[in-house]
């Protein structure tokens, strides 16, 4: 069975993130695993609704010429199984190839660029700072903890390689970043994924490394702009 890695890589990345992300008891002040800053929920704004998050996503006017929004596909329920990475397997969850993190308040969008296979996607989540921090930290640690492993999506094996990357400094309260290489049917695709938590907001930008680097600052600025204006 042939698989078009270039068009499925972002979906598989989302599937790996589609695991239980809620933390256990986080009462009080929990230190951040990445920066040592306290994730004190009392000091952060109340979580935003999904509708509010939708207005903070990038659109074509933000990105510039050459970008086309990808239509949202109907939900697919292909089984996704992780092989040779116990840390990821132990996270569990009913991952699907169009999955997202399981925080209830969320919004997402995706674009293709220049009529090529280059893509960029953006996801926004809102919850208490401690839940966002614990959830995304646990998942990124699992994904980068196995240098190589295999994902079987809908019966198709995809070889994976993961690499932790330096995080962007000066953005948000916490940052995570990784490089994923998907290989199947003799083709490989590289996807960069960077996550930034700022208070009760979590931003994840994924896609072609050059596109992620180009638009990350812009995505965070738009996600936070209305909150800043309100203050």
Image: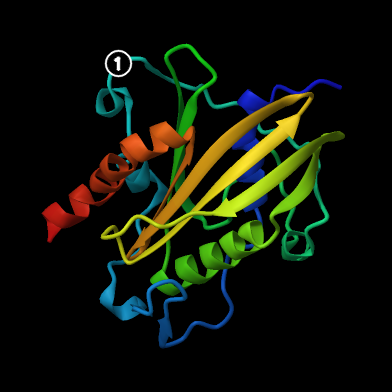
Residue wearing tag 1:
65
Dot 1, crowdedness within 10 Å: few (<14), some or many (≥20)?
A: few
Quadrant containing the C terminus in the rendered view = bottom left
On-image quarter of the N terminus: top right
Query: Compared with residue 123, is residue 30 higher up or lower down, i.e. above or below?
Result: below
Instruction: Examine the rendering and report whether any part of residue 100 can be seen.
Output: yes
Determine the residue located farthest toward the bottom in the rendered image.
Answer: 28
Give residue 215's position: percent from left, percent from top. 32, 36
With respect to residue 228, does 206 lie above or below?
above
Tell me the SS state at disc 1: loop
| Residue 99 shows up from this direction | no
**Could you tell me residue 86's position as x and y percent?**
79, 63
Q: Is residue 213 left or right of residue 228?
A: right
Residue 105 location (% of width, % of height):
46, 54
| Residue at 31% from the left image edge and 79% from the top image edge | 42
At x 40%, y 32%, the residue is 211
Query: Horizontally, is 62 left or right of 10 in the view?
Result: left
Q: How is the image coloured?
A: rainbow
> Measured from the top left, where is residue 72 in percent x and y?
54, 27
Residue located 58% across and 35% down the image:
190
**Residue at x 66%, y 62% (from the top left corner):** 145
């Amino acid at each position: 069975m042939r698989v078009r890695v270039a068009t499925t890589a972002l979906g598989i990345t989302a599937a790996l993130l589609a695991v239980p992300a809620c933390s256990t008891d986080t009462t009080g002040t929990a230190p951040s695993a990445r920066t040592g800053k306290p994730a004190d929920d009392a000091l952060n704004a109340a979580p935003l609704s999904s509708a509010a998050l939708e207005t903070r996503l990038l659109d074509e006017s933000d990105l510039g010429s050459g970008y086309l929004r990808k239509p949202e596909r109907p939900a697919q329920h292909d089984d996704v199984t992780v092989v040779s990475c116990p840390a990821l397997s132990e996270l569990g969850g009913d991952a699907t190839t169009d999955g997202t993190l399981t925080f209830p308040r969320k919004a997402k969008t995706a674009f293709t660029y220049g009529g090529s296979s280059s893509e960029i996607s953006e996801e926004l989540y809102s919850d208490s700072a401690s839940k966002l921090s614990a959830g995304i930290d646990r998942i990124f640690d699992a994904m980068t903890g196995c240098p190589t492993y295999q994902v079987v999506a809908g019966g198709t094996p995809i070889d994976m390689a993961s690499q932790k990357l330096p995080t962007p400094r000066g953005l948000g309260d916490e940052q995570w970043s990784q490089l994923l290489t998907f290989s199947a049917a003799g083709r490989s695709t590289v996807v960069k994924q960077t996550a930034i938590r700022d208070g009760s907001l979590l931003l994840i930008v994924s896609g072609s490394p050059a596109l992620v680097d180009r638009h990350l600052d812009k995505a965070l600025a738009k996600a936070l702009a209305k909150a800043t204006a309100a203050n």
